[in-house]
Image (cartoon, rainbow, N blue to C red):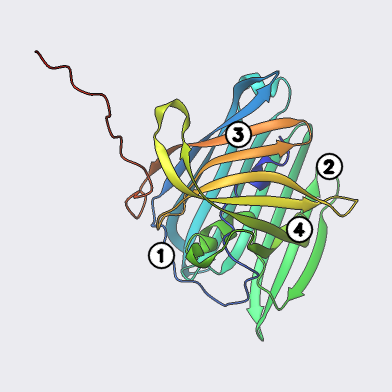
Amino acid sequence: MKKIILLIFSIFLLTGAANAQSQENTAFQSGETLTYDLYFNWKFVWIKVGTASMNITKTYYNGQPAYKAYLITRGSKQADKYFVMRDTLTTYTNLNLVPQYYSKHAKEGKDYRVEDVWYSYSNNMAHLKMRYKKNDEPYEYRNEDSKYYAYDMVSMILRARSFDPSTYKEGHRINFLMAEGNKTRWRQVIYKGKKDIKMKDGNGTYKTLVFSYVEKQNDGKEKEIVRFYITDDKNHLPVCLDLNLNFGSAKAYMHGAVGVRHPLTSKKKIIWTDKPICAS
């Protein structure tokens, strides 16, 4: 389950390498909360292993108006017998969705990790001060400067949701720079087209945009790590993910969405096709 927190919310990465200074928020509003159910395939049976939730609120950071977003994942008691997962991620951006600060506290298996990223900007450059700690080891510090704006997992969610993917063609590749642990890494997703997705537990069917998150292997070949489905409307909400992990398959389904800014026009209406029974 170690990669799930990274993969689930790579799903919002709808843009190429971003070096613009700001992005107008057109997708979400303060008070939005999304919830997810996580499932793992155990001997051909899908078992619920945990939940995830994300909340966005308008607040202040260093005395300036800002958005605060947190992302929390929690494994179930049943899953704890095999793998403990307790992750809390928090980010602050200004109102133009430029990252200001990020923190991650993650209990994954037997390991406990802490990450912090402080962002600053000058001379058309982004400056990152990163701090990383694993278990009882001392903190590692690293500073990086880049002409490309870097993002953590949560701030990229906020920014990318407002991009317009309507011009993408199947096979379009998307690059982005992400701060992870004590360094930055280039990541990539591939646009796969559109598809209708039927949700679990009778939660409806959505028109979605399909993306594939890939990683290069040691032999140079690409491996699909996760395929994800995003609502084809102004909200760009992830509703379903198929994950290919080293130890098996996993899925995530959106369970609830509260305080969404725009109507969920991507959710298909139920059309009853059964003919009524009429008296002769």
Towards the viewer: 232 or 110: 232
Q: Nearer the viewer, mark 3 or mark 2?
A: 3
Towards the viewer: 277 or 173: 277
**Which three-letter amino acid code belongs to the residue tagged 1?**
Thr
Disc 4 designates what residue? 131
At label 2, counting other C-alpha atoms closer than 10 Å, the crowd grade (few under 14, some 14-19, many 20 or more) is few
Residue at the image point whose x is 38% and y is 48% from the top:
266
Q: Tag 2's secondary structure?
A: loop
Disc 3 designates what residue? 251
Q: Which residue is outermost to the front?
A: 280
The first of marks 2 and 1 along the sequence is 1
The span from disc 1 to disc 4 (Cα, nearest Å) is: 32 Å
Q: Nearer the viewer, mark 3 or mark 1?
A: 3
Disc 2 designates what residue? 136
Q: Which residue is outermost to the left?
A: 280
Towards the viewer: 168 or 231: 168
> Against 177, is 261 above or below?
above
The span from disc 3 to disc 2 (Cα, nearest Å) is: 33 Å
The span from disc 3 to disc 4 (Cα, nearest Å) is: 31 Å
The span from disc 3 to disc 1 (Cα, nearest Å) is: 28 Å
The first of marks 3 and 1 along the sequence is 1
The span from disc 2 to disc 1 (Cα, nearest Å) is: 42 Å
